[in-house]
Image: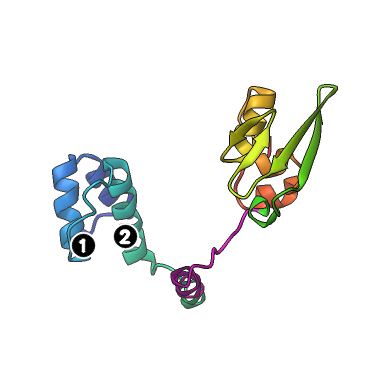
């Protein structure tokens, strides 16, 4: 009697990291990347079990991924942040709890209160004390598009 997908995946979960690496080599015909964590090894192998049983990605999805990979090889980002399109010198203004906060876009990074930051998210954290999507916090992205690409939109 053949094992179910769930039973095969449960079998993977019982393996230690060296055994998962050996299974990777058997499955993909090459060694696993050196620094790949046990969790990621397990997830990739579990996906492969499901793909073998259910057929994997559609032809259209594979074409789309190939197209994205080709564009990335050319140095094009598949999904760029709105913050990447801001020109140096632009001022971003946000009111938070009755206080106005101004950020100046620099050639590399952002200036907030005389300090340089690498990302808008770090500035949003400094202002609010909680983690935010910086582009969302400063109104460069709306909640609907953030939800569609997987951010929490806080």
Residue 110: in magenta span: no
- What residue is rendered at 74% in x and 48% in y? 89
Q: Which residue is labeled 1 in the image?
A: 27
What span is colored magenta in the figure? Answer: 64-81
Q: Position of residue 154 (x, y in %)?
A: 68, 34
Q: Position of residue 46 (x, y in %)?
A: 32, 52
Between 125 and 20, the one lying in front of the other is: 125
> Mark on residue 151?
none
Q: Considering only vertical position in the picture, is 112 above or below 46? A: above
Q: Quadrant of the N terminus?
A: bottom left
Q: Considering only vertical position in the picture, is 148 above or below 127? A: below
- What residue is rendered at 66% in x and 36% in y? 111
Element class at badge 2: helix
Q: Position of residue 68 (x, y in %)?
A: 50, 70
Q: Which residue is labeled 2 in the image?
A: 48
Q: Is residue 102 visible?
A: yes
- What residue is rendered at 27% in x and 47% in y? 36
For label 1, count other residues whose C-alpha is less than 10 Å away and answer few (under 14), some (14-19) or many (20+).
Answer: few
Give the quarter of the image for residue 124.
Answer: top right
CB atoms of marks 2 and 1 within 8 Å: yes
Disc 2 to disc 1, C-alpha distance: 8 Å
Residue 77: in magenta span: yes
Q: Is residue 152 visible?
A: no
Q: Considering only vertical position in the picture, is 99 above or below 132? A: above
């Amino acid at each position: 009697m053949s094992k179910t997908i769930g039973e095969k995946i449960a079998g993977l979960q019982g393996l230690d990291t060296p055994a998962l690496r050996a299974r990777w080599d058997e499955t993909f015909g090459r060694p696993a990347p050196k620094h790949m964590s046990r969790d990621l090894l397990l997830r990739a192998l579990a996906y492969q079990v499901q793909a073998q049983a259910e057929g994997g990605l559609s032809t259209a999805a594979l074409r789309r991924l190939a197209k994205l990979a080709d564009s990335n090889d050319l140095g094009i980002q598949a999904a760029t942040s709105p913050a990447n399109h801001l020109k140096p010198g632009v001022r971003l203004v946000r009111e938070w709890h009755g206080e106005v906060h101004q950020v100046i876009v620099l050639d590399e990074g952002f200036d907030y209160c005389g300090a340089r930051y690498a990302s808008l998210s770090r500035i949003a954290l400094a202002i609010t004390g909680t983690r935010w999507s910086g582009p969302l916090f400063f109104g460069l992205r709306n909640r609907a598009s953030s939800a569609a690409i997987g951010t929490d939109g806080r």
